[in-house]
Image (cartoon, rainbow, N blue to C red):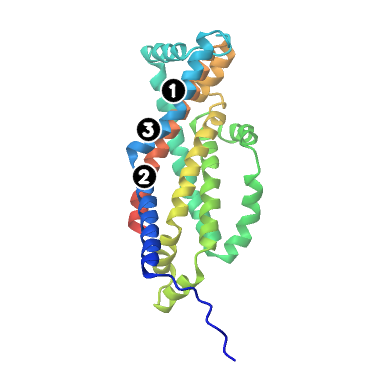
Amino acid sequence: MSIPDQRVLVPADSRDAVDFAKGEYRQTDAVSRNIWDRTGVRVTVGLLLPVVILAAWQFVTTTGLVPPYRLPTPGSVLAAGVELAQRGELWTHIAISVQRVLLGFAIGSVIGLAAAGAVGLSKFGDTLLSPTLAALRAVPSLAWVPLLILWLQIGEESKVTLIAIGAFFPVYTTVASALRHVDPQLVEAGRSFSLRGWSLFRTIQLPAVVPSVVSGLRLALAQAWLFLVAAELIASSMGLGFLLTDSQNSGRVDRILLAIVLLALLGTITNAILALAEKYLLKKWA
C-alpha cells in the first residue's frame, strides 16, 4: 500500500509572489544596513545622546535645580578650560597625559602580544604562564602604586609602567584565547602544504586572529586611559590625572568636569584612530 503524496502544490503565480516578497525583504534589509553603515548617519545619531545630556545639564544648572557648587554650568566649565589654555597649562596637561598613555599602551601591547603568542601557540607556555598571569590580573591597579614608587621612584618610569600593566592584560587575554581556538582543520591544511613555524603562523593563524588582535588593542587603549589617572597619582605635577586631584583639593568642580570631558574626548579620538586601523587590517588580512 503506497503512502499518498501529501505535498502541497503552490500555484506558480503564488510562488512568484513569495519569491518577490522575499526579494523585497532582502533588498529592504540591505538598504537599512547600508544606511546605518554610512559615516554621516552614524556620527549624527551618535551625537544625539551627548546633545541631550548637554541640554539637560544646561537646564538643571540654569534653573537652579542643582546648585552651582555641585554642578557648574557648561559655560563655566568651558571658561575654566579657556583660562587654563590662556595660561598655557591646559595643553601641557594634555600633552603629558597623551605621551604617557601612548608609551604605556605601546609597551604593554607588545609584551601582551608576545605573552599571548607563547600561551596560545605552546602547551608548555600555557601551563607555565597562565596561572601566574591569571593571579596578577586580579591585582587592583592602585595596589601596584606603592611598589612602583619603591622600585622606580616617582619619575616617568613608574607612571608608564603602571599604564603598561593596564594595557597588557586585555591584549594578552583576547589574543591568547583567539590563538587557542584557531580552527584546527585550517592548521592541519596548512601543515599538509608543508607550512611550519613562522610560515604557518603568518599564513594561517595570524589572519584568523587579526580581528581579536584589533579588539584586544582597542580594549587595551581604553584600559590605558583608565590607568592613567591612577598613574598620575604617583606624585605627579602635570597631566589630566593631576588636574583632577588638584582641582578636588582646591574645590574647583568646573576643572574636575573639564578634566573628565577631556579624558572622554581623548579616549574617543584615539579609539577612532584604532578603528580606522582596524578597517585597514581587516581588509588586508581577514
Q: Secondary structure at mark 2?
A: helix
State the residue position of label 1: 93
Q: Quadrant of residue 127?
A: bottom right
Residue 30: give x, y in percent of width and height: 36, 52
Q: Residues within 10 Å of mark 1 (few under 14, many from 20)?
A: many
Residue at 53% of width from left, 63% of height from top? 181
Q: Nearer the viewer, residue 98 or 204?
A: 204
Give the residue displayed 48% in from the left and 15% down from the top: 58
Quadrant for the N terminus in the image: bottom right
* Total numbered circles: 3
Give the residue at mark 2.
Answer: 37
Task: Say which mark, if any, is on residue 28.
Answer: none
Q: Amino acid at mark 1?
A: His
In the picture, the disc for residue 44 is 3
Distance from the alpha carbon under mark 2 to that under mark 1: 36 Å
Q: Is residue 243 above or below residue 3?
A: above
Q: Camera-side residue: 261 or 151?
A: 261
> Nearer the observer, disc 2 or disc 1?
2
Q: Return the disc, 2 or 1, that comes first in the chain's sequence.
A: 2
> For the residue marked with disc 2, what is the amino acid?
Asp
Give the vertical position of 29 relative to 147 (above or below).
below
Q: Is residue 17 left or right of residue 231?
A: left
Q: Is residue 61 above or below residue 143?
A: above
